[in-house]
Image: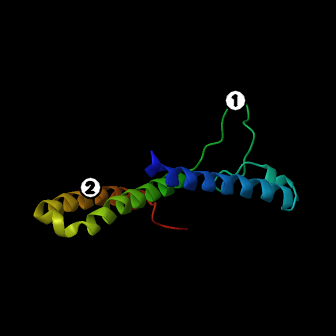
Amino acid sequence: MNAYVPIFVLGAIALAFAVFSVVIASVVGPKRYNRAKLEAYECGIEPLPPTAGFVQRIPIKYYLTAMLFIIFDIEIVFLYPWAVAFDSLGWFGLAAMTLFIVNVSVAYAYEWRRGGLSWE
């Protein structure tokens, strides 16, 4: 149990710092409220109240951007450990990563075809 004491102390310090930062920011920080700050942020779309029971539609462009982020994020999460352990993986590791890159390329091609990579 003595081996875990430094981990618990570090966790307590991190928690105390987070709580202290939030409290001190709310006490000392400026309090300039306006209409724009109080509204929910919806990816740049002005939030409108639902009319006659219909909800405002969000353009597909926002979903494509989110999908692009997920593709980049997943690719980096799996490529980094592979690059670190490249020497010990051998040909199997190279074949597995080639298959992974091919699968990710399918998602990139879909994104490109749907117009998710054109920033107008």
**Where does the image place residue 117, in percent across and percent down from the top left?**
45, 65
| Amino acid on which the number 1 mark rests in the picture | Gly
The residue at which mark 2 appears reads as: 103
Q: Residue drawn at (67%, 33%), measured in percent from left and top?
A: 54
Q: Nearer the viewer, residue 32 or 117?
A: 32
Residue 37 position within the rendered picture, expressed as x and y whole percent measured from the top left: 80, 55
SS class, disc 2: helix
Tell me the kind of residue under disc 2. Asn
Instruction: Point out the image quarter for the N terminus.
Output: top left
Instruction: Check contact, mark 1 vs mark 2: CB within 8 A.
Output: no
Q: Residue furthest top?
A: 53
Q: Residues within 10 Å of mark 2 (few under 14, many from 20)?
A: few
Toward the viewer: 39 or 30?
Answer: 30
Is 29 displayed left or right of 22 in the figure?
right
Residue 45 visible in image: no
Could you say where residue 14 lies in the image, as x and y percent from the top left? Answer: 61, 56
Q: Is residue 26 left or right of residue 74?
A: right
Q: Residue at x 56, y 56 (%)?
A: 10
**Which residue bears the numbered disc 1?**
53
Kindly indicate the quadrant of the structure image that contains residue 101. bottom left
Q: In the shown orientation, is residue 114 left or right of residue 30?
A: left
Query: How is the protein colored in the picture?
Result: rainbow
x 24%, y 66%: residue: 85
Q: Find residue 7 and report its horizontal and vertical position in percent.
A: 50, 53
